[in-house]
Each structure stands twice: as structure tokens, then as C-alpha cells.
Amino acid sequence: MSELFNILQSVRTSEQKMVLATIIDVEGSAYRKEGTMMLVFEDNLQIGLLSGGCLENDILLRAAEVFKDQQSRTLFYDMKSDDDTSWGLNNGCNGKITISLEYVDAKLKKHLELLDKYINQGVPVLHIKKLSHSNSVLSSIFIPAHHPQFGDLNHDELISVSSTIFENNINHKLFKKDLNRYFVQVFHPKPRLIIFGAGPDVRPLAEIAVKTGFYTVVTDWRPDYCTPMHFPTAHEVILEGPSKLLKSHPLTSKDSVIIMTHHFQKDQEILQSLIQENLTYLGVLGPRKRTQQLLNKEKIPEHLYSPIGLAIGAKGPDEIAISIIADVIKTYREKGCELDLWNIFSGRSKPKNGLS
């Protein structure tokens, strides 16, 4: 999840020439899927991966051509072929991959900077690219949920194409309409993870959460624990009690919450405040017996993750942190990303004639 945000930050801050590479189609199996992006700089520095490393060197060579003529183009790799001159040589993949290369000119840079602004404000953005028959980019448009769109796709064409997208819930996919080709992707904001507790075992958890792309909030009422010095990468470190935090940070169904204060009364207070909330993930550290005590010996509901984390036999704070984040990511993939596009971008019933 974190690659997109690193790419957009680099677009915003770098003065180098850049090429944006995006996987737009996959047939069969591949290391990465449609919508995966990589940014290539003129000095060959790259951010992100489009494969397990078997394609990147060739992509860098092709990007050099884009830097010269500043024209978008498409690369096609057949990972199935047994031909020694192909890309099928012992790479462990068995698919066909189509990759779009776009020169980041002033217009695209501005659009990517706006994209960065919106998703950092928590706004999902729908992106539609119109492609030529050779899959080079002809025009595109960015549609932030409930905000003005920006780009150069024809308005009448947008109405027609968006109708197809919403009716079929097309996400990260190459498709055809009226003899034209389009690629659609949705950029989601960082999912928010709130950790109640700031003890030493929370530090690796917060660090891994940030690295894997979560907007990470650490909160605790104890000043010796809850300090930015202990959580230098966390997006927010908030010194206050649970009830105040919940008032200042209203929760949504896209949020994940982990309770690990190691203080029975505080854990109980937090859990009782959250048990009825509709969250992507709610987990509490400790054995199920303790969780049942936190719930006054009531049955542990299915939506409450206890014990927290995937069962990998974790030992020590670092391994436990990995198991917890793995569990949150797994649940996020199952719940948070499987959203109806029209619900994201409107919240009303689906339109009859595209975007309204």
C-alpha cells in the first residue's frame, strides 16, 4: 500500500525528469497486479516494483527512450514463452503483462500532485485513461469523490464510459467500449489504524504499520510512554485519555483499531466504547479469557479479533507486530477494498447515464 504514497510524494518534491510505469493488464499469474505503479527517474533511480525484479532492468532501458521523445508507450511481456530470447526464462511467473509508460510532463505532474492532495485528505480518486490501439495514453481524467474532476477526457465520452464503469463495478481493469480502450483504477487514501496504548511493544507495531501504508495514530494517557520520540514515524502521537480521543477522532467503517494498553480498566473502557462500532478491524491484545473478562464474561463477538494477530507462533514484540499487521491487512483486503464504486463516489443509487 505504501508504494503509491512514496511515488506521489516523490513526484511532488523531485525536480528530476520522471516516467510513470503502470501495469494495465495481466493475463495468467504475475508477481504484481493491475494498477501497480513504479516511478523511474532520469538517473535510473526507481520507486516501486512491477515484478519480482525480472522486468525492471528492461523497463529502465525502455524508460530511457521515453525520456528522449517524451511520448507514452506500452510494453508487453510474455512470461509464458519458452523462447530463450523471451521473458519466460525461469522467472517463476506464468502470465502476460502489459505496462504503460508515461512521461511525467507539467500537466501530468500537476494532476499527480492534485491526486496526492486529495488522497492525503482522505478522498478516494477514480482515474480513467483513454488508450490508443497500441495502448499509449491519449487522455485521462481524475475524479475525486464529491470534488471537482480534473483532466482532459471529453465530457460526453466520460458520461458514457462512467456508466459502464459503475454498472459493472470496474476497478483496476483494462476494458473496451465503442471501439475505444480504457484503463480504470481507484486510488484509495491510506487506511487509518488507531493504536490505543504506547508501551514498548507498540513501537515496532507502529513502525511496521507506517511502512505498510497505514495512517498510524498512537494514543495513550501516560506521558512517559506517549511521546513522538518513541514513535518518530507515526502520523499522530496523541497524549490523552480514550474518551477524549474518540471525540476528537470520530471513527468510520474504514478504520482499524488495536487495543493494547496493558491496563485492564482502560482496555475495558475502550472496548466497551467500540464494541458496537462498525470498523474494518477491532482487536485486543491478550488471551481470549482476558477479553471475556473485559466484556464482563459475555460471549466474544465474531467481529472482535481475540487473540489478536495471525497464528504464526510469534514470539517477542517484533514478531507479534508482524502477526498483528498481517491480520489487519488480511481483513482490510477482505472488507475495505471490496467496495461498490458508486457507493464510494456518490453514496446514492447508481446513475442511469454515468456520472451526475
Image (spheres, rainbow, N blue to C red):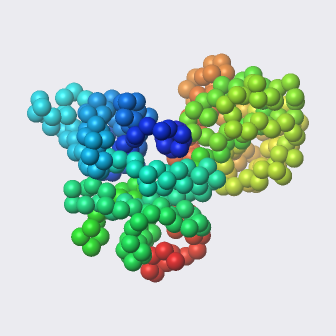
Residue at 87% x, 28% y is 223
Residue 126, how many percent across, how many down? 48, 60
Q: Quadrant of residue 177?
A: bottom left
Using the image as rendered, state which of residue 130 and residue 344 is in the foreground.
130
Residue 326, how many percent across, how many down? 56, 34
Left or right: where 115 falls relative to 239:
left
Residue 54, how many percent across, how many down? 28, 30
Residue at 28% x, 30% y is 57
Residue at 31% x, 41% y is 67
Q: Quadrant of residue 145?
A: bottom right
Left or right: where 251 falls relative to 47:
right
Query: Vertically, is 255 above or below 217?
Result: below
Residue 219, how many percent across, how many down? 79, 37
Q: How many marks?
A: 0
Q: Is residue 204 visible?
A: yes
Left or right: where 148 falls relative to 36:
right
Using the image as rendered, state which of residue 249 and residue 263 is in the foreground.
249
Using the image as rendered, state which of residue 86 and residue 90 is in the foreground.
86
